[in-house]
Image (spheres, rainbow, N blue to C red):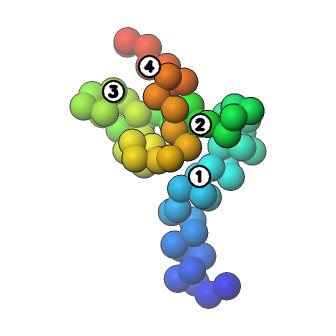
């Protein structure tokens, strides 16, 4: 795999999904709870999760600080 293909995969939704599987954040129905990040407008959800097909909004828990 050349460097450009590695970089494209590294920033893909599939790579993120693989990483979330490794940390145990994927449910049995292959839905993800999302990652914390972003800002107040995104309800502190990482912007990379906003349009992800694996993200399930009902699983994301954001606590008020």
Q: Where residue 40 sits: x, y (%)?
A: 27, 28
- Quadrant location of the N terminus in the rendered image: bottom right
Residues at discs 3 and 2 in contact (Cβ within 8 Å):
no
**Residue at which label 3 appears:** 43
Mark before the other along the chain sequence, 3 or 4: 3
Q: Where residue 54 sits: x, y (%)?
A: 55, 43
Disc 1 on helix, strand or loop?
Answer: helix
Q: How dense is the environment of label 2, judged by Cα within 10 Å: few (below 14), some, or many (20 and up)?
A: many
Task: In the rendered view, tell whether residue 11 sits above or below residue 25.
Answer: below
Nearer to us of marks 1 and 2 is 2
Q: Quadrant of residue 42?
A: top left
- The image's mark for residue 16 is 1
**Residue at which label 2 appears:** 32
Mark before the other along the chain sequence, 1 or 2: 1
Disc 2 on helix, strand or loop?
Answer: loop
Mark before the other along the chain sequence, 3 or 1: 1
Mark 4 to mark 1: distance in Å? 20 Å
Q: Quadrant of residue 59?
A: top right
Disc 3 on helix, strand or loop?
Answer: loop
47 with respect to 16 (left or right): left
Please name the residue shown 52% across and 62% down the image: 12
Task: In the rendered view, tell whether residue 44 sits above or below residue 54.
Answer: above
**Residue at which label 4 appears:** 62
Q: Where residue 55 sits: x, y (%)?
A: 51, 38
Nearer to us of marks 3 and 2 is 2
How many numbered markers are drawn?
A: 4
Residue lying at the far front of the rendered structure? 29
Please name the residue shown 59% across and 36% down the image: 32
Q: Where residue 46 sits: x, y (%)?
A: 42, 40
Mark before the other along the chain sequence, 4 or 1: 1
């Amino acid at each position: 795999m050349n460097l450009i293909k590695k970089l494209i995969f590294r920033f893909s939704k599939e790579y993120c999904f693989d990483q979330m599987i490794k940390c145990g954040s994927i449910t049995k129905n292959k839905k993800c709870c999302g990652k914390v990040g972003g800002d107040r407008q995104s309800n502190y959800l990482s912007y990379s999760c906003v349009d992800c097909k694996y993200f399930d909004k009902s699983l994301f828990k954001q606590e008020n600080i």
